[in-house]
Image (cartoon, helix red, strand yellow):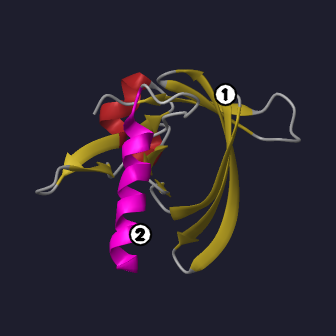
Amino acid sequence: MKRLLRFAIAAAMVAGLHDPKQAGALDLSGAWATSTDECPNVFVRRGRAKQIEFTALSDQHGGGFIVEADRLRGKFARCKIKTKKEDGDTVNIIAGCAADIMLSNVQFSLKMLEPNRISRIFPGIADMAISYHRCPI
């Protein structure tokens, strides 16, 4: 019974991430690259389920990341979102990440600039930000 309840809660949360009418929730799901023009060089759909994956040379084209429900994926790391707090148009995320044999907690601050454009900001470091565009893949 607990397992079914957890599944129902997770499904409701995933549905909430994709609901464009949901007030206040920033939709970050999808594949994000540093330039829309680079999307085909960074991401590809593979397998029977046509899952979004990184191309072999994605890091040579600016790289990017994939947001899925409660996970963030980079080419060399997989992260599980531990906490997520929205503050206006900024989302602060703490995620537990695994890369090769190393585990660590990482903090992300993402600011929504437009519906398909975000900026990763680095609190405490003035004028440092990396812009990302959602890929139409």
| Amino acid at the residue labelled 1 | Asp
The answer to whether 89 is drawn above or below residue 54 in the figure is above
Q: Earlier in the sequence, mark 2 or mark 1?
A: 2
In the image, which disc is placed on residue 89? 1
Q: On the rendered image, what quadrant is the C terminus found in?
A: top left
User: What residue appears at the point 77 percent right and 33 percent down from the top-left corner?
Assistant: 128
Q: Residue furthest front?
A: 1
Dominant SS in magenta? helix
Identify the residue position indicated by label 2 in the image: 6
Callout 2 environment at 10 Å: few (<14), some (14 to 19), or many (20+)? few
Secondary structure beneath label 1: loop
Whether residue 16 is in magenta: the answer is: yes
Provide the residue span drawn in magenta. Answer: 1-20
Front position in the image: 133 or 24: 24
Q: On the rendered image, what quadrant is the N terminus found in?
A: bottom left
The answer to whether 22 is drawn above or below residue 10 in the figure is above
- The quarter holding residue 119 reads top right
User: What residue appears at the point 44 percent right and 56 percent down from the top-left corner?
Assistant: 75
Visible in this render: residue 123? yes
User: What residue appears at the point 30 percent right and 33 percent down from the top-left corner?
Assistant: 40
